[in-house]
Amino acid sequence: MEVPDASNSRKTKALYEFIRRLAFKKKLNPDNAVTIFVTVLSKGDTRGLSDEELSAMTGIKQGEIRNILRMLYELRMVGYRRGRHPETGATRYYWYPDYSGINMTLYWRKKQVLEKLRERLRYEEENTFFRCPRDGTRFTFEEAYEYDFQCPKCSSMLVEEDNTMIKEVLREAIARLEEEIKRDEELLRSH
Ligand SMILES: [Zn+2]
């Protein structure tokens, strides 16, 4: 499977944004969640990193780290192996990045974004829009009709808007994403 590449910044950004949002929902610190993920991704590749090591590397408390790792594990973005503490012999967990899970997460994120873009395009195609020439507020035909084609904020006459460009940009973004998703599906099938 294709390994996420830090140089592919658009992909990386989408991934971090996803982790941030999820951490927020779970009442975890979003920045710390990204920090832990990045640290596991960059340094945990061969033998993995223990909670203790992650704490020493990032300054984040072990209890919080465990909650973050649990969240990432539920998403299959990290995996772990059981090991022994070199001195005490106590059981320790070593965390490493799970690339197939990471790619799967990215794939589902792309599908969600595609659905949103399609919805937005439908909205643009099915409506006629009006805009206030002074403050730029946008209205659907129904809204503009209700206001007698006068801006409710500044009373300027509303002007019909040509949304051809918006639709064009949306169609291009959709086509690009569909292409990417198709490639991801081919990759997922071949593994
Ligand atoms: Zn106005």
Image (cartoon, helix red, strand yellow):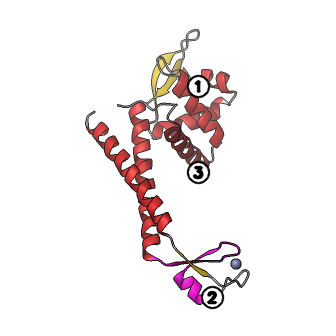
Q: Which mark is residue 147?
A: 2
The residue lying toward the viewer, choosing from 90 and 104, is: 104
Q: Secondary structure at mark 2?
A: loop
Please rate how many residues cluster around mark 3, counting C-alpha atoms within 10 Å: few if below 14, some from 14 to 19, many from 20: few
Residue at left 50%, top 25%? Answer: 95
Q: Which residues are magenta?
A: 127-146
Q: Amino acid at mark 3?
A: Lys
Identified at 42% across, 69% down, the residue is 122
Tell me if label 2 and label 1 are in contact, CB under 8 Å.
no
Q: Nearer the viewer, mark 3 or mark 2?
A: 2
Query: Residue 62: horizontal and vertical position, in percent?
Result: 64, 29
Residue at horizontal 60 percent and vertical 80 percent from the top = 159
> On the picture, is 153 further left or further right than 12?
right
Of the numbered discs in the image, which one, if any, rests on residue 25?
3
Q: Mark 2 or mark 1, which is nearer to you?
A: 2
Amino acid under disc 2: Tyr
Query: Residue 108 at what x, y percent from top left?
Result: 41, 48
Residue sitting nearer the eye, 78 or 149: 149
Residue 51, numbered label: 1
The quadrant holding residue 36 is: top right
Q: Which marked residue is nearer to the observer: mark 1 or mark 3?
A: 3
Q: Quadrant of the C terminus?
A: top left
Q: CA distance from mark 1 to mark 3?
A: 22 Å
Q: Residues within 10 Å of mark 1 (few under 14, many from 20)?
A: many
